[in-house]
């Protein structure tokens, strides 16, 4: 079974390396030289060069020349793991077995954008790792493999990304031989149960201390590395915050946004209810106790 692999992020690279380790026939790889969109961008050409795999850099996956390249390689199937672009019919039909996509959510729920970030921001306790047959919809095709993943209070974007990756690589090991010998099954999605998460905007990453401490904690852990980070505004300057801790305080007469204490470069700030300790951040000089965040 000849595979054309498409991907541009950290997970893509690990999945490609897993396929190679399993002895899969990778006929070619489509990737990008750079991406201003994906914070976890990873160029796959070093893996290709080490393993003698043909590759091509693209900007628009749906161009006719890319469709023809897949057909010229006589690919049986395409794996599109982490490309952040909707595949149109030309790509979806370029190989006879179609395209296998990946979405780290429990489809049909939570289709759409930022499936690592949103469950953390929303404080969800479960997600999933899902491989599916792509169609012209967004994450709406038949499911090939799905495994549930627990989200703990301690998880952040980095640890959840790693959990998803570990789970997905085990799934690849399980379903690859089924695809090769045509013993796989397709499970249609129940579209009546579907919802789609929207694209995150810059203002979604702003910490507003009118929020409760749990909401601030969830926002920061959802946007921490490998993503762009949450931020505060201090003296009209945007400053990134990478880690916070919730701190229980009983100060009902203190306004939100007030700096309560600063020790060892860690900043304690009153929220609507309790407080949060800004543990890791990009302040060059922290504010003084008694100052306020806007």
Image (cartoon, helix red, strand yellow):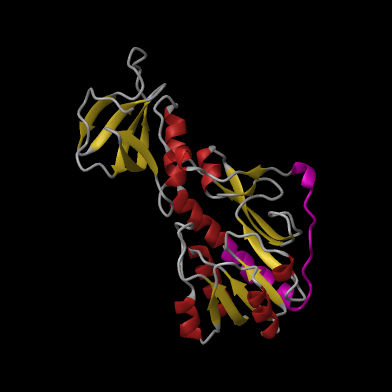
x 30%, y 43%: residue: 281
- Compared to 219, does 166 lie above or below? below
Q: Position of residue 39 (x, y in %)?
A: 44, 56
Residue 22 shows up from this direction: no
Q: Image check: 72 left or right of 163?
A: right
**Depicted 116 relative to depicted 35: above or below:** above
Q: Is residue 23 magenta?
A: no
Q: Position of residue 222 (x, y in %)?
A: 47, 44
In the picture, measured across the screen, residue 229 lies left or right of residue 17, that is left
Residue 163 placement (x, y as % from top left): 52, 56
Instruction: Identify the residue at the far bottom of this view.
Output: 52
Q: Quadrant of residue 264?
A: top left
Q: Nearer the viewer, residue 269 or 257?
A: 257
Image quadrant where one finds the N terminus: bottom right
Task: Give left or right: position of 108 versus 215.
Answer: right
Q: Give the farthest residue toward the top.
A: 253
- Which residue lies most toward the front here? 64
Q: Quadrant of residue 274?
A: top left
Q: Which residue occupies the foreground of this view, 266 or 183? A: 266
Q: Which residues are magenta?
A: 168-193
- Residue 195's place in the image compared with 2, above or below, is above
Q: Is residue 184 left or right of residue 258?
A: right
Residue at 63%, 65% (x, y): give it.
171
The structure residue drawn at horizontal position 28% and vertical position 25%, both measured from the top left corner, is: 292
Q: Is residue 261 above or below residue 42?
A: above
Residue nearest the observer in this picture, 121 or 236: 236
178 inside magenta stretch: yes
Q: Specify the quadrant that holds the C terminus.
A: top left
Return the x and y of residue 111 as percentages of the image width and height. Answer: 66, 49
Question: Magenta region, mostly helix, strand or loop?
Answer: helix
Instruction: Count the marks.
Output: 0
Q: Is residue 119 visible?
A: yes
């Amino acid at each position: 079974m000849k595979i054309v692999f498409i991907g541009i992020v950290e997970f893509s690279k690990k999945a490609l390396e897993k396929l190679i380790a399993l002895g899969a026939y990778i006929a070619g790889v489509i990737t990008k030289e750079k991406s201003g969109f994906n914070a976890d961008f990873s160029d796959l050409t070093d893996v290709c060069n080490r393993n003698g795999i043909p590759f091509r850099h693209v900007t628009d996956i749906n161009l006719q020349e890319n469709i023809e390249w897949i057909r010229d390689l006589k690919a049986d199937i395409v794996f599109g793991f982490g490309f952040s672009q909707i595949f149109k019919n030309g790509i979806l039909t370029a190989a006879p077995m179609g395209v296998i996509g990946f979405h780290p959510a429990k489809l049909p729920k939570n289709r759409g954008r930022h499936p690592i970030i949103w469950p953390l921001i929303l404080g969800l306790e479960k997600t999933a790792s899902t491989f599916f047959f792509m169609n012209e919809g967004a994450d709406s095709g038949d499911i090939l493999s799905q495994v549930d993943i627990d989200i703990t209070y301690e998880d952040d974007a980095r640890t959840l990304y790693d959990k998803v990756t570990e789970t997905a690589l085990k799934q690849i090991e399980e379903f690859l031989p089924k695809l090769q010998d045509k013993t796989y099954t397709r499970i249609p999605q129940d579209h009546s149960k579907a919802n789609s998460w929207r694209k995150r905007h810059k203002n979604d990453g702003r910490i507003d201390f009118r929020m409760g401490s749990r909401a601030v904690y969830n926002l920061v852990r959802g946007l921490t590395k490998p993503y762009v980070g949450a931020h505060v505004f201090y003296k009209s300057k945007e400053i990134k915050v990478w880690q916070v801790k919730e701190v229980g305080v009983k100060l009902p007469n203190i306004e939100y946004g007030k700096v309560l204490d600063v020790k060892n470069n860690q900043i304690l700030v009153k929220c609507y209810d309790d407080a949060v300790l800004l543990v890791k951040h990009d302040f060059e000089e922290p504010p003084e106790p008694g100052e306020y965040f806007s």
